[in-house]
Each structure stands twice: as structure tokens, then as C-alpha cells.
Image (spheres, grey):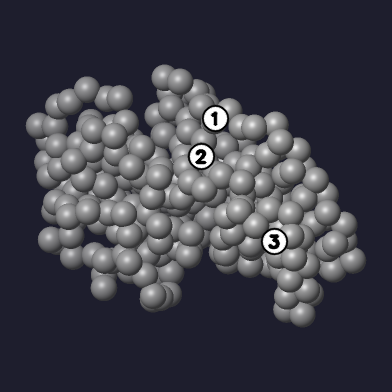
Amino acid sequence: MSADDTSLDRLVTAPRLLVALDFDGTLSPLEDDPMAARMLPAARTAVDALTALPCTWVALVSGRSMSDLRIIAEHGDDSPVLLAGSHGAEYWTPQSGTVEPTDDPADVALRDRLRGEAERATAALPGVWIEPKTFGFGVHTRKAAPADAEKADSAVDEIVTAAAPHWRRRTGHNIVEYAFRDEGKDTAIAHLRELTGADAVLFAGDDVTDEDALRSLGEGDLGVHVGPAASTSATVVVGDIPAFAALLARLAEERGARGGIDCEHV
């Protein structure tokens, strides 16, 4: 369904509001070159308007590694926007900067070995790209022919299953991700809600990996799926990024017009 007055009113009037947003496919179009992704201007304008409001926090919640997320989001050290990278395993706040977990060197060594094996196994398949990630790697097949994409996914599945069957496997738009950590975007939402003391949360995403976060939302929160209608736990579906940017802009305008909001920022 589309956003209505009731679904936005509880966000407009929430004493402390967290707006948590996936990036790729939600604020930025999906790109053949993942590092070319950037927010659409309308989305950037809406995000800026929300961050300017009192008692309102905006967070980007992404499967990207923190270093890559900061590049594509054009996120500087002076930004008020909170970040959760690697599906909630890494965080950035204005007060603490980047916070990463301490990992077992054996996990890191296995990550590097399996990534190398994946690169060698897919080297002859045109359009396949192995993306290094902090806690694993991703197999991109957006530019590959369907048969080559299937070969790549099968080959890497076999490699990871044999050496690291405990790793988490996620699928997305033309990507399969493997990680030795188990955090999901539901982890990120719970952490950011506690960090900000939010009374209500809006979370929006476009992909299968966003469903963990959407399912974790409670009464008074709002889940939004961006893109064609699909099987989703979201309560609101908007057709594309411009439509979602318009929803965010409306939220910013109505929350700003409310006035009288006064609380300390995190």
C-alpha cells in the first residue's frame, strides 16, 4: 500500500525519531559499477532536511563495508548521519568515528584465502566481479550473462560450503554475499534504536537483505519497501526512489512544521 496520513502521523509526532535507510536501490539507483552509486539529488535533499530537525536522526544501514559506504554516501567526518555497515557489524557516529569488532585472525586469514579462490574460480567468466568486504566477500553478476552468473554462484557456493559451511550466505540484486559474521540489519536497527533512544523508527529498503530489519519493527514504527511490489514485511510500498524521496520530504516538512520538539541529540 502507499503511505497515508495515519502511517506518517505517528512519525511526525514521535518525540524521538530514527530514520534508518538502506542505500543501494533505496536512495541511489543500482549501478553496474557499485562504487559509482550516489544518492539521487531529491533523496539527498530530503535526507539533509531530516538531519536538520531536532530529535531526528538519520542512519544509513547497508551491507557495504564502512569504507565503501562512506565513499558512495559522500559522508564526511562532520556529517550528522549515523552509519551501520556490513549489515550491522560496523558503526560510525560523530562522537566515536568508526567502531569495528575485533576478529579472530584465523577468520581474516580464511576470508582472504576463500576470496582468492573465488577470484580464481570466476576469472574466466565475463562480467563477474568479486567484491572484497570487511567480513567476507560478494560475488557480483549484474554484468554477466545468466549462464555465467549461474556458473559463478555455483562455483563459489561449492568453495565456501567446503571450507566454511558456518558462514552466512545472503542473496541480493545480482549478488551473493558470504560473511564470517552473522549480524543482520535487524541487529543494526536494534543498536541504533538504543543509541538514539528513538520512540519510533522508519526503515526503508529494496532488497531481500532488508527484510531482517523490516520484520524487526514494532508497533509505532514504519517499514517501507522501495520498488515494485514484492513479498515483503513492509507496511508501505513505494514504486521507486523518487517516490520514496518525496515521502521523506513530506515527513521532513510535516515534522518540521510541528515545532516544539526539544531533546538532546546523541
Q: CA distance from mark 2 to mark 1?
A: 7 Å
Work out whether residue 243 or residue 178 is closer to the camera in this orientation and state it.
178
In primary-sequence order, the first of circles 3 and 1 is: 1
Is residue 50 visible in this depiction of the protein? no
Residue labelled with disc 3: 161
The residue tagged with tag 1: helix, strand or loop?
A: loop
Give the number of the disc on residue 100.
1
Amino acid at pointer 2 = Ala
**Residue 11 shown left or right of residue 90 in the figure:** left
Instruction: Name the residue at the bottom extreme.
Output: 147
In primary-sequence order, the first of circles 2 and 3 is: 2
* Image marks 2 and 1: residues in contact by CB distance under 8 Å: yes
Is 61 located above or below residue 145 in the figure? above
**Residue 3 shown left or right of residue 48 in the figure:** left
Give the number of the disc on residue 224.
none
Residue at point 57%, 37% (across, down):
66
For the C terminus, the image quarter is top left
Single out the mark in the foreground, 3 or 1.
Answer: 3
Single out the mark in the foreground, 2 or 3.
Answer: 3
Give the number of the disc on residue 89.
2
In primary-sequence order, the first of circles 2 and 1 is: 2
